[in-house]
Amino acid sequence: MILLIPAGVALIYREEAAFLAFLQIALPTGIAGAVLFWLTRASGLTLSNHDGFLVVTLSWVTVAALGALPFFLTGAIPSYTDAFFETMSGFTTTGATILTDIEVLPRSLLFWRSFTHWLGGMGIIVLTVAIFPLLGFKGLQLVRAEAPGPSVDKLTHKITHSAKILWLIYIALSALETVLLLAAGMDLFDSLTHTFGTMATGGFSPRNASVAAYNSLAVDTIITVFMVLAGVNFVLYYSVITGRFRTVLRDTELKVYLGIFAVATAITTVALHGETYRSWGESLRYAAFQTASILTTTGYATADYLHWPGVAMTVIFLLMFVGGCAGSTGGGMKVVRLTALFKQGINEMSYLLHPRGVFSPHMNGAPLKKTMLLGITGFFFLYFFLLLLTTLVVSLSGASLMTSFSTALATLGNIGPGFETIGPTGNYAAFPPAIKWFLSAIMLIGRLEVFTVLILLTPRYWRK
């Protein structure tokens, strides 16, 4: 029934074809949902961890398949392959697009395109978990399977209550950004669509030139700040609300995340000054925006960084390996994993110097569990294996090595733009249909933290 929201937008802008398309999909899916609700409300179902992986994966595939229909039925995107790719990119907050002229689409479809970001940002499953008590079964297994990060912490003793708190924080920050963008001169439509892309770290814009179309210092500053905020673990916002400031101040991941952003921005600013932009202020403005955009895997652009000096481009490239914090809407490998592995590397060197010593890497004042470190190690192996596999598959289309590798980084890390053909002014339209289906799967694997989808491909999962 969520499709009734863009249907309302279609009515406002008198887009009859789009309105009918949304209605065609909303009515049968609404009826099917009502029937499923009636059949399951008294069943007392309990999902195991085993069930959660399958339900989450199928849920994301289903919403992408249905969400693509408005684009396809209206003819805005004539190919269902392209429509599915665009929608999967939206729900996974990747921001990779096949559209060569965005602004020709009806406003309601542009709204829906950005709205898929916002829904996928905090996670459709987390939204579902918030209302699961109505269906009579528990949802922690789904959150564990979907949540972006190496671990899931409940804010309260009830997971559904925790989900509601996270969504309220998400909505509050979204509302604040929308108001600020309105004050900066954007109209309501553009303010909402850019807020959806910012808070979800997605990057879809209703403008061909992305955020650069506004050429506004105020707009750039607001979106930069909220991109950085969206890349922070949302649990920390709850800590601030409840007055647990010490928890925030001692959070290792937050310190590293902000440190990476500050250092990357400083290096890029220095590299841009004089050669690309005349003033320090202008250099800082574009450097901060683009480093925040790539670090948080948002993908918005105010400049074509492919024309920047080599040092600045190198910083952008390296940031594609990082991502946001665990528990944020950002994608990528996550700062907490990189931090944990770095600390473990230092720990191993300590063992080499003092073989009989007892050392343990710490984060947030507590020792890291070996099980967590082993899980992170496994994640990194699979992540880089998928990077190499995707690079190979994309190269089969005739793409160059840099295009192929940056495509792998941009889709698996849910970043969107990359280098060469898929740079900030490029798109994914030229790839063959088979490559687009493969990349759609890679975007989903990246969004669901690799293990959730890949575990379904193992024979052991399907054994009783």
Image (spheres, helix red, strand yellow):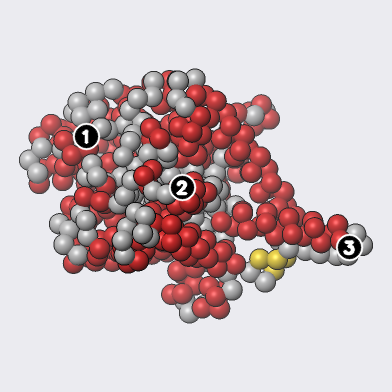
- Name the residue furthest right: 356
Q: Nearer the viewer, mark 3 or mark 2?
A: 2
- From what the image shows, is residue 373 above or below residue 424? below
Measured in 3D between alpha carbons, the distance from the residue under mark 2 to the one under mark 1, in whole angstroms, is 29 Å
- From what the image shows, is residue 434 above or below residue 308? above
Residue assigned mark 2 = 310
| Position of residue 314 in the picture relative to residue 9 (left or right) | right
Mark 1 surroundings within 10 Å by alpha-carbon count, few (fewer than 14), some (14 through 19), many (20 or more): few
| Position of residue 238 in the picture relative to residue 198 (left or right) | right
Three-letter residue code for mark 1:
Asp
Measured in 3D between alpha carbons, the distance from the residue under mark 3 to the one under mark 2, in whole angstroms, is 41 Å
Residue assigned mark 1 = 101
Camera-side residue: 141 or 209?
209
Say which element carries label 2.
helix
Looking at the figure, which quarter contains the N terminus?
A: top left
* Residue drawn at x 59%, y 43% as measured from the top left: 48
How many badges with numbers are in the image? Answer: 3
Measured in 3D between alpha carbons, the distance from the residue under mark 1 to the one under mark 3, in whole angstroms, is 61 Å
Percent coordinates x, y for residue 237 in the rendering: 45, 69
Three-letter residue code for mark 3:
His
Query: Toward which corner of the image does residue 25 lie, by quadrant?
Result: top left
Mark 2 surroundings within 10 Å by alpha-carbon count, few (fewer than 14), some (14 through 19), many (20 or more): some
Check residue 428 in the rendering and tell me which mark sits there, or answer none. Answer: none
Residue assigned mark 3 = 354
Mark 3 surroundings within 10 Å by alpha-carbon count, few (fewer than 14), some (14 through 19), many (20 or more): few
Percent coordinates x, y for residue 223 in the rendering: 31, 60
Say which element carries label 3.
loop
- From what the image shows, is residue 379 above or below residue 70? below
Say which element carries label 1.
loop
